[in-house]
Image: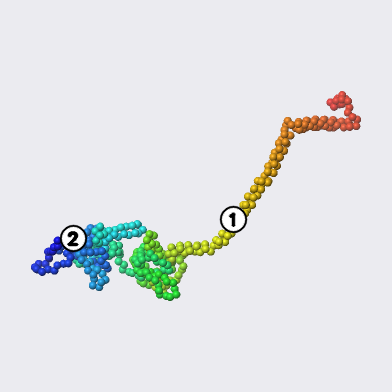
């Protein structure tokens, strides 16, 4: 049932009348520890009794909260139990640790939470940077800022901030406030505002992106900075832009379509004469690679549209029609060859074969014609031998043509002599 709780007071003055609290205190008066005040823009899911974690250990809890008198923020009172209160120094960072912190980046999906309790009822967390961990503990009721995330709490405070503007003649869907300003992987600024340029009439409406630039992150590690004064900084930026430095929208995450502003050198960029005094804080830009790809595709599509495809199709149809007619003519010719010319050619081939067979029979070695030719050649050889004998005799006795041939004995003896 209902009851009235009592806590022991710390003063030595006796009293008999007390004012009851609407809510019981989060801790008893004799619990060792220290109170601190946190200031934030909104309360979030924090309530009285929400835990406060230190390196995922519950080190305290929220005791109360109240709205600021000007309505611009909320002050939260936390109590850190002993011995954790000695880890709270003047440089300690507090942040909201409620729910799940899900981050999708180039390394993958990361989920961060303090505990199941912080997921259900919310919670806070604190930590001190290692380089300042040796500072003395903070006094009770010290006021701290409460950051929305751990990354925001440990973000280095920027002592030098410059405002830049970028004018884009393209869609900035996917670009949000807080998007990084990047130079070859080094984040040296963030987007602070996105709007439309209504300054001049008669010109296309462009998108103006405002950003905060932290030049210290790009400063050379030298004793004397390259651009220390405003005049030196403007001259330095002007030399970079003359060398091709431009801003471009790029996709930071293909899954979510988030964009960021990238600063890089484009050797093929059109040369411009940029005067820091006249241009002010407006930096020159380049179309995004996606827009360039779309423009290239559109150009190719325009060329394809201008290509006389219909005329080529008509010419191709005529060519196919002529080829079809030629094929039909060739088929008719082949049919005529098969029906008219082929039979006559077949008969001529048969007759030629018969003539060759007859010739082969005539010229065989045992054929009568061959025997007669052999006998004739033999007689011709004999006649030739007799003619040679006669010619030889006449060569020796030319007078025989007048006197005739002598007797064989006398002539033989003479011949022998």
Quarter of image, res 66: bottom left
What is the residue that sits farthest to the right in this orientation? 403
16 lies left or right of 257: left
Q: Measuring 55% from the left and 61% from the top, which residue is drawn there?
A: 309
Q: Quadrant of residue 415?
A: top right
Farthest-out residue, front: 339
Q: Position of residue 102 (x, y in %)?
A: 31, 59
Give me the residue at 14% from left, 67% from top: 20
Q: Please identify the quadrant where the C terminus is shown.
A: top right
Residue 411 drawn at (x, y percent): 87, 26
Residue at x 43%, y 75% (from the top left corner)? 201
Residue 320 is tagged as 1
Image side of residue 247 versus residue 340, left or right: left
Check disc 2 and report the residue beneath it: 82
Give SS at disc 1: helix
Judge the density around disc 2: few (<14), some (14-19), many (≥20) Cα neighbours within 10 Å.
some
The first of marks 2 and 1 along the sequence is: 2
Judged by depth in the image, the label closer to the viewer, 2 or 1, is 1
Asked whether residue 310 is in view, the answer is yes
Quarter of the image for residue 89 reads bottom left
């Amino acid at each position: 049932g209902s009851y009235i709780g009592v806590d022991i007071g710390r003063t030595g003055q006796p009293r008999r009348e007390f004012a009851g609290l609407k809510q019981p205190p989060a801790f008893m008066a004799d619990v060792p520890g220290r109170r601190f005040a946190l200031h934030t823009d909104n309360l979030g899911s924090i309530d009285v009794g929400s835990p406060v974690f230190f390196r995922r250990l519950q080190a305290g809890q929220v005791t109360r909260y109240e709205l600021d008198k000007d309505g611009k923020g909320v002050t939260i009172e936390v109590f850190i139990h002993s011995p954790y209160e000695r880890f709270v120094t003047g440089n300690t960072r507090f942040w909201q640790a409620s729910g799940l912190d899900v981050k999708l980046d180039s390394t993958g999906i990361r989920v961060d939470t303090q505990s199941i309790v912080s997921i259900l009822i919310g919670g806070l967390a604190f930590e001190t940077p290692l380089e300042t961990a040796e500072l003395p503990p903070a006094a009770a009721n010290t006021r701290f800022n409460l950051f929305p995330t751990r990354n925001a709490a440990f973000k280095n405070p920027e002592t030098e901030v410059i405002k830049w503007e970028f004018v884009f003649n393209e869609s900035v869907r996917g670009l949000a406030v807080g998007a990084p300003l990047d130079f070859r992987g080094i984040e040296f600024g963030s987007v602070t505002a996105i709007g439309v340029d209504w300054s001049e009439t008669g010109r296309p409406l462009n998108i103006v992106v405002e950003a905060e630039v932290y030049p210290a992150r790009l400063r050379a590690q030298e004793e004397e900075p390259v651009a220390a004064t405003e005049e030196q900084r403007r001259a330095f930026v002007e030399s970079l832009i003359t060398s091709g430095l431009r801003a471009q929208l790029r996709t930071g995450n293909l899954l979510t379509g988030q964009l960021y502003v990238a600063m890089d050198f484009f050797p093929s960029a059109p040369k411009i004469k940029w005067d820091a005094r006249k241009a002010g804080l407006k930096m020159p830009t380049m179309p995004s690679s996606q827009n360039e790809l779309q423009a290239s595709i559109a150009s190719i599509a325009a060329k394809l549209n201008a290509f006389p495809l219909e005329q080529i199709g008509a010419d191709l149809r005529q060519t196919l029609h002529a080829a079809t007619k030629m094929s039909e003519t060739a088929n008719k010719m082949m049919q005529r060859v098969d029906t008219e010319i082929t039979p006559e050619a077949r008969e001529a081939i048969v007759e030629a074969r018969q003539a060759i067979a007859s010739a082969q029979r005539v010229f065989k070695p045992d054929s009568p014609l061959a025997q007669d030719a052999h006998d004739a050649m033999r007689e011709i050889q004999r006649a030739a031998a007799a003619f040679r004998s006669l010619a030889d005799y006449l060569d020796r006795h030319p007078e025989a043509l007048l006197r005739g041939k002598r007797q064989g004995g006398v002539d033989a003896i003479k011949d022998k002599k």
